[in-house]
Image: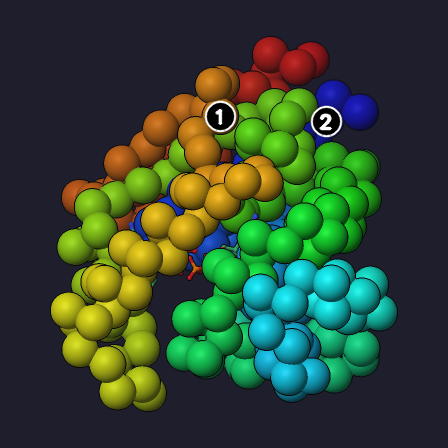
Amino acid sequence: DSDRINIAIDGPAGAGKSTVARKVAEQLDYIYIDTGAMYRAVTLSAQRAGIEPRDSEKLSVHARTLDIKLAPGENGQAVFLNGENITDLIRSREVTLAVSHIAANETVRELLGRLQRQLAESKGVVMDGRDIGSHVLPDAELKIFLTASVQERAQRRFKEIAATQSITLEQLEQEIAERDRLDEQREISPLICAKDAIVLDSTSMSIDEVAALIVKLSRTKLAEAK
Ligand code: CDP
Ligand code: CDP
């Protein structure tokens, strides 16, 4: 079906991936898939079960029992774990601090990767994450690697959460840098810029500018695919 393509958007934390991916999906009438939310769902579930990320055996067994679903929600995408709506719960600081450790588990990555590929099978998907262009959807027609300086990314996140979470800008910048380091250095499908990805530095770009650029790039790819 050459009427639709798949778009992969990868990059470090706070680069604007999910905000931009949602807009692009809206404008193209595509489906947005937030793969970070899936890793967050597994993290929440493991925490509830008292499983440590380093206990990889237990974590693998636990992960196999989970039913994770994404559905269009009021403010973007809702996330369900075994039927429970956990959309807000997965944004807690506790989950954010642990997620990169859980995401290093091989079984967790295999399971979620498989689910992500299934969701993209019929094309027309905008998927954001860390390893989408490099590993999950290596044949995606358009791959974007979205970055911004760590200071800018921390500031963006700070504006978003300062009202509800007690954390300083400096702390947040450190935590983001640490999460990037873990994501870049893990053995299995790390955060990496795919060879054929287009790098977009959004440090001094607005959300609408980035989204418009990606929509334009996808229209070019669509024309090529015909
Ligand atoms: O939105 P934010 O950048 O804070 O993070 P996220 O996209 O929700 O992803 C949370 C974490 O999940 C990342 O820091 C990675 O450790 C992991 N992740 C991953 O390993 N692979 C993906 N495709 C997506 C997320
Ligand atoms: O998904 P990711 O972690 O890459 O980032 P995000 O959650 O989409 O964006 C983090 C914050 O930066 C959000 O509050 C966005 O509104 C904001 N943002 C921005 O101010 N300017 C951009 N060009 C992109 C995002």
Q: In this view of the protein, can residue 119 be seen by the observer?
A: no
Q: In the figure, 138 relative to 63: above or below?
A: above
Q: Quadrant of the N terminus?
A: top right
Front-most of residues 219 and 9: 9
Circle 1 residues within 10 Å: few <14, some 14–19, many ≥20: some
Residue at 41%, 42% in the rendered image = 184
Circle 2 residues within 10 Å: few <14, some 14–19, many ≥20: few
Q: Is residue 146 left or right of residue 1?
A: left
Q: What amino acid type should be assigned to the residue bearing mark 1?
A: Ala
Q: Nearer the viewer, mark 2 or mark 1?
A: 1
Q: Is residue 179 left or right of residue 112?
A: left
Residue at 57%, 53% in the rendered image = 104
Q: Which residue is mark 1?
A: 194
Q: In the figure, 194 relative to 120: above or below?
A: above
Q: Position of residue 28 (x, y in %)?
A: 58, 41
Residue at 22%, 51% in the rendered image = 150
Is the C-beta of the residue carrying label 2 under 8 Å from the nearest atom of ligand 1? Answer: no
Q: Position of residue 12 (x, y in %)?
A: 37, 47
Q: Quadrant of the C terminus?
A: top right
Numbered mark located on residue 175 in the image: none
Q: Position of residue 197 (x, y in %)?
A: 46, 24
Q: Quadrant of residue 146?
A: top left
Residue at 54%, 81% in the rendered image = 88
Q: In the figure, 40 relative to 132: above or below?
A: below
Numbered mark located on residue 3 in the image: 2
- Of mark 2 and mark 1, the one earlier in the sequence is 2
